[in-house]
Amino acid sequence: MRIGIVSPYSFDVPGGVQNHIMDLAEALIGLGHEVSVLAPADEDTELPPYVVSAGRAFPLPYNGSVARISFGPVSTARVRRWISRGKFDVLHVHEPMTFSISVLAVLSSRGPVVATFHTAMTRSRALSAAQGLLQMVIEKITARIAVSELARKVQVEHLGGGAVEIPNGVAVAKYASATPLPGWPGSGGSLGFLGRFTEPRKGFDLLRTAYVALARSRPGLRLLVAGPGDRDELFEEIPADLHDRVTYLGLVSEADKARMLRSVDIYVAPNTGGESFGMILTEAMAAGATIVASDLDAFRRVLDGGKAGALFPTGDAAALESLLGSLLDDPSRRASLAAAAGVAVSAFDWPRVALRVLEVYATAIEATDGRVIDEEWSEPPSGP
């Protein structure tokens, strides 16, 4: 099968959607399919061989963060050229409600279109300003996938119609076989966090507060942090006498992310909201870490209601401190949670997830009977 996949977000910087797309593409290629991915990226960005650049991206505030996207006449021309050359059996776009090349690809498509919805955001000023355009997009989508129950619920309640729920996948073997960083996890206990620590909804301030309190009575306890941000800003709220027990890796590659997750006793996800799935949880589960996470609905579902990881009340730093302390003192409970996570994460292994995605592709192709749509979108509407 010839499959075209579209990422709305730039491959210049890592992100959950971009990682999802790369892992899906590689799983599909491993199953014998021909895959091309179109994504925004600067000309000097090093890309996998199956990725085609749609040109430079610009920042756009979105869902409490900043997305790097492409939109406009130049992007439209590149999208159309890629679709024409690809002669895809199915076009798979991600986040089709985001003003980027996913919208352009749907409107330029002339065959079956599958759309995956990652976020559970229901409203934004951009969406409200372009309802006519988005209605055109919705009408051209043949089949929908939602990565979580919450994202699926949005389809039903706000966009009309449903979606097949297929979770984010994880390359289990890659994480399980990664080598820990030198000197980690150590004997005094170690906590880990990965993400943009300056972004309030990631909840790092809760972990920092809990860690500082715990470290006072645990001389060997260390904290390992990875993700974008300024090192000085990370350390300014941590007492100076604890600086040598906090390690900041900065932005890490996919390989080093796996090593980082293999290096901690407990991975902490203190997010306060805005999460529709929790891909980092499945990655940490695959790496064999014990998970402690906020009691968000999305996290609870991934962690099997708390059987595959410990949950604490969202936003409660004192509860987080107490839970971490009890787990650090109870290696057998940590081992039990990690073992349960190892079983639960098998359902998210990419080869299994990719087979479910292929079923949706087959349904979309059957629904269109292989027809090519004659009508063609001529000019991109002006953006908001």
Image: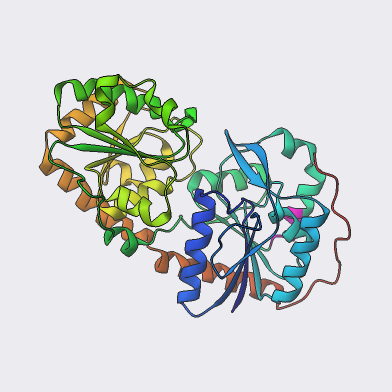
The part of the image, by quadrant, that contains residue 103 is bottom right
**Residue 139 in magenta stretch:** yes
Q: Residue at x 48, y 27 (%)?
A: 200
x and y, in percent, of residue 15 in the image: 51, 48
Image coordinates for residue 335, horizontal then vertical, percent: 16, 47
Task: Name the image colouring.
Answer: rainbow
- In this view, the residue in front, 220 or 39, is 220
The N terminus - image quarter = bottom right
The residue shown at (74%, 63%) is 79
Q: Position of residue 291 (x, y in %)?
A: 28, 42
Q: Residue at x 36, y 46 (%)?
A: 281
The magenta region covers: 137-141
- For residue 121, side relative to residue 212 (left or right): right
Q: Is residue 86 magenta?
A: no
Percent across and percent down for residue 283 are 36, 52
Q: Is residue 106 left or right of residue 325?
A: right
